Image (cartoon, grey):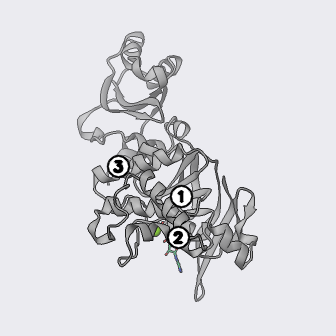
């Protein structure tokens, strides 16, 4: 389990201060995958460096299974750091070493003997789907295979936490999914807390149990995937559910209303029912259905014709178990801009 409490990092550039991390707190229990998503400049790389103490946090704590890394002194810190396996965008392998020697490198550093190392390396290569590649050199492998080697190497010192920094950003979509499925399978080893830092919503959708949105060094939304999408107001909900854009001002009149239904409600025709009960023709102008974290979410945008009170429509939708709110077309135009 990794617990981060009130982590802050301030960089000083002459007289200017950059608050790259500003009070970040999060917990990742073992057997789960937590995603940190944010735009460029949000503080993702700083977070990776501070979590691993490659960079000293200005304040705050990073605990792994209760041991505070920020308090550990050099020797203890080196040992504690081995509790974190790191995987970057590029595997950064030693070109002149075989795959087996790359994977075994962390074991070599701590003095594990050759026979034991060979056995463990073979086990790890099997785990990442490369049982026959031990004698190959990095240049002979595809990008996806090299990333598998990087994952095997990160697992070599038997870490408690695996930290991925943009693990699939350099890969094509098919290879991305293969690597994501491998990460997902590691979760089922059971005792690893996995943290994935990414700017891709697809990564969050496919493998994360919970997610935090990092913006200007702060976590502005956070929670289990099922919860963060189950609202009409969240930025994560909007990004993860991805309602199709349209041009409401030109094409449709009336009042626009966004409707969110989840679980078994997502499969029932709440808009049609509401149309009938309110006695008004509600027009669906955009929509999406997503399956996330084992649940179904339907996000529809409807137009309520002039002459019908939108509040009556919203009340009826809510009575039927959906959530609904009026959407200002000006907000939509800003989103598209
Ligand atoms: N070594 C540094 N010195 C000064 N400012 C930095 C340094 N590293 C990062 N920053 C600043 O901190 C902020 C977050 O950067 P970074 O963690 O690289 O974001 P991300 O990885 O999400 O793109 C940015 O404003 C960046 O300019
Ligand atoms: Mg970065």
Q: Quadrant of the C terminus?
A: bottom left
Residue that mark 3 sits on: 178
110 to 219, vertically: above or below: below
Q: Nearer the viewer, mark 3 or mark 1?
A: 3
Residue that mark 1 sits on: 214
Q: Residue 79: x, y in percent?
A: 67, 70
Residue that mark 2 sits on: 114
Callout 1: CB less than 8 Å from ligand 1: yes
Other-residue count near label 2 (Cα within 10 Å), few / some / many at <14 / 14–19 / ≥20: few
Instruction: Residue 236: tell me if it is visible.
Output: yes
Q: Earlier in the sequence, mark 2 or mark 3?
A: 2
Q: Nearer the viewer, mark 1 or mark 2?
A: 2
- Judged from the image, the secondary structure of the residue bearing numbered disc 2 is helix
199 to 315, vertically: above or below: below
State the CA–CA distance, disc 1 to disc 2.
43 Å
Other-residue count near label 1 (Cα within 10 Å), few / some / many at <14 / 14–19 / ≥20: many
Residue positioned 33% across, 59% down in the render? 144
- Judged from the image, the secondary structure of the residue bearing numbered disc 3 is helix
């Amino acid at each position: 389990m990794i617990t981060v409490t009130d982590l802050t990092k301030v960089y000083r550039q002459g007289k200017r201060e950059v608050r790259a991390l500003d009070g970040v707190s999060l917990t990742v229990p073992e057997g789960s995958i937590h995603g940190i998503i944010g735009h460029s400049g949000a503080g993702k790389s700083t977070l990776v460096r501070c979590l691993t103490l490659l960079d000293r946090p200005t304040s705050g704590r990073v605990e792994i299974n209760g041991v505070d890394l920020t308090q550990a002194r050099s020797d203890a810190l080196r040992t504690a750091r081995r509790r974190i396996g790191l995987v970057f965008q590029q595997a950064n392998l030693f070109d002149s070493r075989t795959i087996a020697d790359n994977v075994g490198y962390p074991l070599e550093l701590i003095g594990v003997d050759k026979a034991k190392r060979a056995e463990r390396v073979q086990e790890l290569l099997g785990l990442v789907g490369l049982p026959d590649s031990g004698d190959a050199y990095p240049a002979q492998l595809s990008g996806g295979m090299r990333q598998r080697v990087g994952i095997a190497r990160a697992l070599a010192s038997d870490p408690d936490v695996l930290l991925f920094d943009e693990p699939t950003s350099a890969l094509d979509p098919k290879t991305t999914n293969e690597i994501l499925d491998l990460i997902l399978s590691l979760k089922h080893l059971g005792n690893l807390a996995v943290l994935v830092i990414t700017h891709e919503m697809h990564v969050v959708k496919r493998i994360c149990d919970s997610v935090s949105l990092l913006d200007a060094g702060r976590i502005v939304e956070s929670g289990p995937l099922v919860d963060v999408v189950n609202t009409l107001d969240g930025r994560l909900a909007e990004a993860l559910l991805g309602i199709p854009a349209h041009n409401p001002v030109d094409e449709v009149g009336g009042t626009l209303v966004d409707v969110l239904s989840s679980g078994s409600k997502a499969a029932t025709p709440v808009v049609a029912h509401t149309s009938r009960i309110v006695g008004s023709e509600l027009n669906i102008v955009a929509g999406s259905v997503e399956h996330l974290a084992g649940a179904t979410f339907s996000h529809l945008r409807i137009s309520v014709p002039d002459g019908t009170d939108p509040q009556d429509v919203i009340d009826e939708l809510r009575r039927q178990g959906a959530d609904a709110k009026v959407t200002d077309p000006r907000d939509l135009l800003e989103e598209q801009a």
